[in-house]
Amino acid sequence: MKFSVRDLVYIAIFGAIWGAVELTLGSYLHVIFPPLADTFLVGMIMASLGVIVALVGRHFVPRTGAVFMIGVVAAILKMIGIGGVTVGPMVAILAESLLMELGLLIARKHTRWGFVLAGALALAWNFFHKFIMMFFLFGKGVYEVYAGMVKQGASLLRIDLSYALLIIVFLLLIRLVAGGLAGWIAWDLGRVVHDRLAR
Amino acid sequence: MTVWQDSRAMPRTRRIAFSVYGYLFFFLGTAVTAILAREGRVVLVLLGTLLFAGVFHSQALKLLRDRKIWAFIVPTLLLSPLVIGEPDLEIWGLHLSRAGFWAGVWMALRALCIALAASVFARAVSVSQMAELLEGMRLKGLGFALGVATNMLPTIQETMQTSYQAIRLRGGFRSGRLRTLRLLLVTVIAGSLRRGDDIVSAAEARAFDPARSLGSSISVTHADLALAAAFGALAVALLLV
Amino acid sequence: MIDIKDLTVRYKGDQTALDGLSLRVQPGEFVLLTGPSGCGKSTLARCLNGLIPHASKATMTGRVAVDGMPTAEHTVAEMAAHVGLVFQNPSTQLFGSTVAEELAFGPRNLGLSPEEVAQRSAFALEATGIQHLRERATTSLSAGEQQRVAIAAVLTMRPRLLVLDEPTSNLDLKGSKAVLETVHRLCIDYGLTIFIIEHRLSEAAALADRMVVMNEGKILLDGPPEDVFRERHLLSELGVRCPDPTLHPHNIAMHSVEGQMQRSGTKPLVQLEDVEAGYDSHLVLQEVDFAVYPGEFVALVGDNGAGKTTMARLLAGLLKAQRGRVTWDEEVQRVPLGRRVGLLFQNPLDQLFCDSVEEEISFGPRNFGSLSDEKLDSLLDVTGLAKLRHRNPYALSVGQQQRVALASILALEPALLILDEPTMGQDWGSLSRVMDFLTRLKGHGQAILLITHDHELVRRYAERILMLEDGKLSNVAPHDGESSTMDIRRERLHEVLSS
């Protein structure tokens, strides 16, 4: 990955914007939402905003690796900002930016649909993030805990286990749609910002 | 006399025993050994992690006061006896499993080991060291980008706050909230990018050229190697015993 | 040291920034360059280190040589060892997370050995007197300290010429003084040639050996500051501010007391009683008691970090008082927030959201449902923006952008208008035009609170002055302590101007 000084400066600026959004809005949302909503809703909102910022950045640095670099900068800033303790958000930002790069690589051309794919893939991580982090931290035993929880929850609410699974699939779908929408918005926003600066 | 030999730089000397690689070995080594350690052996790994953190980076122990980590550990501890293994105990009408209880304890301790090791790494390694480490992984120019971003972050946060307050005072959120959010985002991004030209000029005026590698100033110390060897031996022992 | 012959620079669209300019500067000189916004000062600075023509879309003709090196024939990196360029905004020129890293950045780019890097860092720290900041994080420094770090960082390249492009425009009086004293010391003790661009001349002119005034890409005046300031008429036409010989901190204090006495007996627009305010557990304002009356022009002065912006946010309703009372006039209390107080922030770009001037100005009234074409037309007329109504605010000059931002706030007809540091990037000419316009507004009962550290602006326009020191209001102007070189020389300059 070879970037010019201007590319690197733009990467830094978009990384800083993503980091600033995480540190200001993220901290605020984490405080006002209860823990369950925190996991599902706040994570999705923050990931969508991150996708928008990073993909607008791609408009200004149209090179492979730019989105990942923006993600690395944002992840490190987030880590410094919250006192260098939590690895989770850092891993999430890095994985999201890597998946965006993957989406853009698959799409090949610089198109709106490439942005939509990149956004959808990035938000998909948001769904798996907690499971993967839990596996890494606690080991596979934690899945038994979760599976047991789902089973007990289903029997408590007297619903079929397959419905519980349907809910989980639905949650994944919501993320894919949100990610696609974020990519769509980023495509438009990038052009608006470009036009504004060109005048 | 050079600037680095000044007495005020001395408090760092104890930490210098390990380079950024040492702390990386520590994090990776702890994670691997915690994963490999079966059942009660994880206690030993945790004790070692606590000892290392206490001696070399006691600040990292603040993690134990973080409510977030306990928010994940406590439910695991409480739920495991209910959902893992065959129930062989009844307390207050709840059918619990001893095996599930111990499985929960070992999982919690393993999580603590890894989280603590990550905390040591994150606190011991400076931003620029981390950037240098990543530059070594072919992310050229990352150190520079990170330096720019670190110094721009307060300005961007200020811009975000000012723009939000300005649009709020002009009634932006009274109607069309999504349109207002879009306007806000465009203003923040465009305003930040406008500073880009000055940053590029300032970098070029100080002879910065991303094509030219500055070389890493970090080198592996004897302590790093000793630590890596210790973890290697421990991992082998855990695999064999 | 500097040898410029027939220098012409054109940007895209054939816009001429410099027009056949010639200039010679001797080694060790301290040269002050000034002129109205857009006259080509910054372009000239960028020509001196080769950013133009090497790293810019501008086309350059003529010859520029610095320290005997023609800039067109050497790269920016090669010129960096001869010319150091310090920019206006510290946050756009810092690259390290600590001061030590910042100082090492340039020498490392030159490929120097770690020993040489350390030696140069030590020299720069000592020369700028900031040894105590070495281990500090750059983001934890005040703006003045950051600017001194930026100067030190440039010094590590061992330049013989130091070019500073409005280095004090974001700083308060204390910060400006520290930066200028540092620069002066570099000239006297280390023999560096100084080329400084400034709008606020009072302090810099006191230190300069020579002053150059530019307009429309050409040099109009060149000579010792005392001689240049004698051309008052021409300077005033150009919008260049002459230092006011009658301006003294003690005059400001007296002014304040008189103003307050005159106001007694009138019903206040807003009154603050024993107010404490801040962010989370950090208390910024303490024991604040004061009132603003309808139709008055009040100034709030104080150093950076004294709590001026917190006060603005408190009055604008963006921040709640943690203790005490903020009481508004009953009628004003009923109107919504944005129509009660209009707040003009320092950077116009942070508060421009729309694609045309007209849209921008009607944005607020449309949201409050009070849009009328007549009002819009009249506002465009009085603010001198009628001809620009369809233009994109981003394509305007900083002065014009500031006027658009102001007009968009005035469109809501707020009872109290707060201007938070409106001097950024503005020359004295455009600044005084805005201020004159605001003074006329007072006639309609609108109160104005001007927040600034520009004492000259305050003295000229404010009826009453409040001073914030460490979050507390005081009527006594701060004492500067011992007289510095700058103070002594400024006194001398004032004597000359008075005579």
Image (spheres, coloured by chain):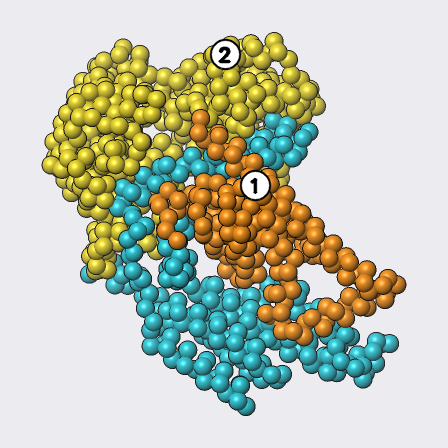
State which chain disc 1 sits on.
A
Give the x, y percent position of residue B163.
Answer: 54, 34
Kind of residue indicated by mark 2: Ala
Could you say which is closer to the camera, residue B215 or residue B75? B215
Can residue A25 be seen here? The reply is no
Q: Is C114 left or right of C380, judged from the image as shown?
A: left
Question: Which lettered chain is shown in cyan?
Answer: B
- How many neighbours does mark 1 have within 10 angstroms: few (below 14), some (14-19), or many (20 or more)? some
Give the chain coloured yellow: C
> Element type at marker 2?
helix
The C terminus of chain B sits in image quarter: bottom right
The numbered mark at residue C386 is 2
x and y, in percent, of residue B131 in the image = 40, 58
| Chain of the residue under the numbered disc 2 shown in the image | C
Image quarter of the N terminus of chain B: bottom left
Say whether residue A134 is left or right of residue C6: right
Q: Colour of chain A?
A: orange
Q: Which residue is mark 1?
A: A112
